[in-house]
């Protein structure tokens, strides 16, 4: 049976996030963006709303909501600013849900519970200066020493790098397999900021998502207890890919919110601005751009909702989530470009939000798998070169009784 109505819990979440964003963040986001300022108080407010553990079971400190709720929150946050959704992507999607899927009970109690409550902030460390889409190109290494590993390496373009407390880090634990580029030599580690040899910094040269923190961190023989290995040694690649299923889902839903923001800003401006004696909303080519935004918004929303339903069912969704992320981010780039065009010269001004939308949207077609990588993935599914099979990589099904 197919249904498209959200339940009461979904509606209340959507309304509460929308009202908070409009009241407490939207009036300030322009100034935060212009100042390149990251406001840590936003974490506290998101925790109060239950967002930092939105899809984590109540038994582990979370709100116990389903995965559709995670998508709804992502859409509403990015409607206000991409920097808000990024927090949810890395903290919940990439880190918390990885601990929920792969963590031991001790790891969940020590790390997942305080993260879901918003007492600690978490992020994800995969990308390096010489390795993005090419995960096998990672250079970070982990040398076993007694009951610990010594981690050395550098991670780059890490969201929340300079503010997070906990990091999910990927490194080669088998140096022979590193030479062979065999991903079964990669291992995932839970690293704390306070571990000796760990240092981080903020990247200042971004031109988008300026109200968010993006940076790097270095590890100089950081001693990590063997108890902090997530999953088993050698499962790092599987964990990284399963995490991306969740991160891409939040990016897809978030980009959908950005399309809606572009649509709403364009429609409002087109009704206000007059040219050739009429509102520019009366001009056919302006209507065409706004209609395209509406079409893209509705399609993108259906794609991420389908992926969220599959997650709730505990079914493998790599293909569907990848398609949702690819479509929504490419469509958001088109919507942002057209929104600037609808605004004309004013779209080129920082006084209007569409310039910020245009700068922010570009990240979505790069991180969590570039649009080119997703193009190849979707083609390979159609051609039969790639297939999804049920594995341990998927999230546990949503259980409303928890």
Image: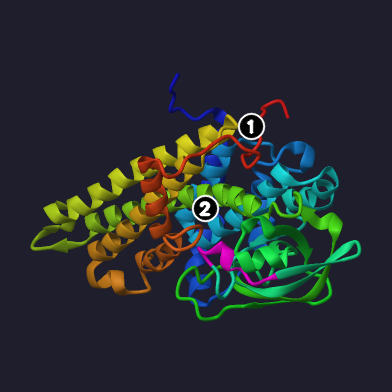
Tell me, yes or no, whether the highlighted magenta stretch contains residue 109: no
Q: Which residue lies most toward the right here?
A: 146
Residue carrying label 1: 397
Element type where label 2 sits in the image: helix
Taking the image as shown, residue 292 lies to the left or right of residue 330, namely: left
The answer to whether the residue labelled 2 contacts the one labelled 1, judged by CB atoms less than 8 Å apart, is no
42 with respect to 357 (left or right): right
Q: Mark 2 or mark 1: which is in front?
A: 1
Compared with residue 35, is residue 380 higher up or lower down, i.e. above or below? above
- The circle on residue 312 is none
Mark 1, other Cα within 10 Å: few <14 / some 14–19 / many ≥20: some
- x and y percentages locating residue 142 in the rendered image: 76, 67
Residue linked to disc 2: 77
Q: In what quadrant of the picture does the C terminus appear?
A: top right
Q: Which residues are magenta?
A: 132-140
Q: Classify 368 as above or below 158.
A: above
Taking the image as drawn, is residue 50 in sight?
yes
63 vs 30: above or below: above
Which residue is drawn at the image coordinates 35% and 60% (left, top)?
333
Quarter holding the N terminus is top left
Instruction: Provide residue 318's location: percent of width, then percent of height.
Output: 51, 43
In the image, what residue occupies the spot 47% across and 40% down? 387
Residue occupying the far bottom of the picture? 205
Q: Position of residue 186 (x, y in %)?
A: 68, 59
């Amino acid at each position: 049976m197919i249904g498209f109505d959200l339940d009461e819990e979904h509606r209340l979440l959507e309304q509460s996030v929308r009202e908070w964003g409009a009241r407490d963040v939207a009036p300030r986001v322009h100034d935060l963006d212009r100042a390149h300022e990251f406001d840590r108080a936003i974490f506290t407010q998101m925790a109060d709303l239950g967002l930092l553990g939105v899809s984590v079971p109540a038994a582990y400190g979370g709100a116990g909501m389903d995965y559709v709720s995670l998508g709804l929150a992502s859409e509403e946050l990015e409607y206000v600013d991409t920097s808000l959704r990024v927090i949810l992507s890395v903290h919940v999607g990439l880190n918390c849900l990885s601990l929920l899927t792969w963590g031991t009970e001790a790891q969940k109690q020590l790390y997942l519970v305080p993260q879901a409550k918003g007492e600690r902030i978490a992020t994800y460390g995969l990308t390096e200066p010489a390795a993005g889409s090419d995960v096998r190109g990672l250079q970070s290494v982990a040398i076993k020493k007694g009951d610990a590993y010594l981690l050395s390496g550098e991670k780059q373009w890490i969201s929340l790098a300079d503010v997070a407390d906990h990091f999910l880090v990927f490194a080669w634990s088998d140096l022979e397999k590193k030479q062979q580029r065999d991903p079964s030599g990669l291992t995932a580690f839970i690293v704390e900021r306070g571990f000796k040899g760990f240092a981080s910094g903020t990247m200042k040269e971004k031109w988008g998502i300026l109200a968010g923190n993006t940076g790097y961190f270095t590890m100089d023989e950081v001693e990590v207890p063997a108890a902090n290995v997530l999953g088993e040694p050698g499962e790092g690649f599987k964990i990284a890919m399963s995490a991306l299923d969740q991160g891409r889902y939040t990016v897809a839903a978030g980009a959908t919110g950005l399309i809606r923001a572009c649509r709403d800003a364009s429609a409002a401006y087109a009704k206000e601005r007059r040219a050739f004696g009429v509102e520019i909303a009366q001009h056919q080519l302006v209507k065409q751009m706004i209609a395209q935004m509406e079409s893209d918004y509705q399609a993108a929303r259906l794609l991420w909702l389908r992926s969220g339903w599959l997650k709730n069912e505990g079914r493998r969704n790599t293909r569907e989530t990848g398609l949702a992320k690819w479509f929504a981010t490419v469509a958001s780039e088109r919507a942002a470009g057209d929104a600037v065009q609808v605004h004309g010269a004013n779209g080129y001004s920082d006084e209007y939000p569409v310039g910020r939308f245009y700068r922010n949207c570009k990240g979505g077609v790069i991180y969590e798998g570039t649009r080119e990588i997703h193009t190849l993935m979707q083609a390979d599914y159609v051609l039969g070169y790639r297939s999804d099979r049920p594995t341990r990589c998927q999230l546990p099904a949503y259980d409303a009784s928890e």
